[in-house]
Amino acid sequence: MEKESEPMKEHIEVVSFDVDGTLVPMEFNNLIWLEELPSLIAKKEGMSFEDAKAYTISEYEKVGEGDLRWYEMNHWIKHFDLDASFEDILSKYESKIETFPDVVPTLERLEDRFTLILTTAMPREFLDIKIKTIKQFFKFDFSVISDFKQLKTPDSYLTICNKLNILPSELLHIGDHWEYDYIAPKEAGANAIFLDREKKRIGDFIIHDLEELEL
């Protein structure tokens, strides 16, 4: 288990949140990537759903999450030669989008004291539909893939700081991906808190629920 002992830098101006797994559960993603696309492939190719799902996952894994194509719906629609649009696919499951119970109370608690922003690796078409019910809390939202053509790297966090005209030490990022949401912002000189909803890690700057966030 990792334990981080470096103290958090003082004078936080901006609090940044990841989206998937942090504010919004993963069920919507699973419906899109592991249910809808395999269903479309099964219908197109005359395959069973189980075979289509296994094939779909194998194709995802050939690309991997370190490649921008992994996140881009239009890439996969073209790759699988599907007669579908990402707008239709996303709107079909829009009613399934929800936020974790601790999200709105936390945002209400912080919104008057900090500038709140979103920093995500998902493409903007996903981001816009997922944050409709909480968009009012955030002054800015950044899709690093759509806006900067990057993943969440130290450089992307520095770019955001430059756009907001703040020092990295004035940014606190909170998210559930150890590399992208904790290590990367720390390497940029920002503050970071790792949100481990599965309770697999313990240590300083690791929380298991947003209600544990003390600012």
Image: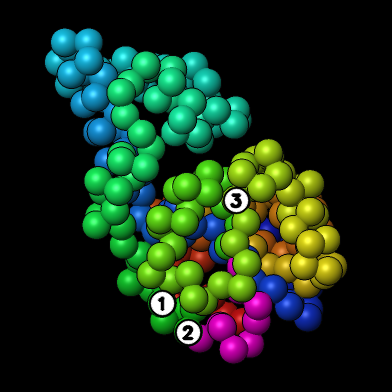
Residue count near mark 3 (Cα–Cα under 10 Å), binned few <14, some 14–19, many ≥20: many
Q: CA distance from mark 3 to mark 2?
A: 23 Å
Residue count near mark 1 (Cα–Cα under 10 Å), binned few <14, some 14–19, many ≥20: some
- What segment is highlighted magenta in the picture? 109-117
Sequence-first disc among 3 and 2 = 2
Judge left or right: residue 201 versus residue 114.
left
Say what amino acid the circle numbered 2 marks. Glu
Coordinates of residue 152 in the picture (x, y in percent): 66, 45
Residue furthest out toward the bottom: 112
Judge left or right: residue 27 versus residue 48.
right
Residue 197 visible in the displayed image: no
Say what amino acid the circle numbered 1 marks. Val
Residue count near mark 2 (Cα–Cα under 10 Å), binned few <14, some 14–19, many ≥20: few
Q: CA distance from mark 3 to mark 1?
A: 21 Å
Q: Is residue 45 above or below residue 132?
A: above
Which residue occupies 50% across, 86% down?
A: 109
Which residue occupies 63% across, 67% down?
A: 140
Q: Are marks 2 and 1 in contact (CB under 8 Å)?
A: yes
Q: Is residue 113 above or below residue 74?
A: below
Coordinates of residue 138 in the picture (x, y in percent): 56, 72
Q: How is the image coloured?
A: rainbow
Which one is in front in this view, the residue at disc 3 or the one at disc 1? 3
Query: If the image is split into quadrants, where does the C terminus sit?
Result: bottom right
Q: CA distance from mark 2 to mark 1?
A: 6 Å
Residue that badge 3 annotates: 143
Q: Is residue 188 above or below residue 214?
A: above
* Quarter of the figure with residue 79: top left
Dot 3: element: strand
Judge left or right: residue 102 versus residue 192.
left
Residue that badge 2 annotates: 108
Residue that badge 1 annotates: 104
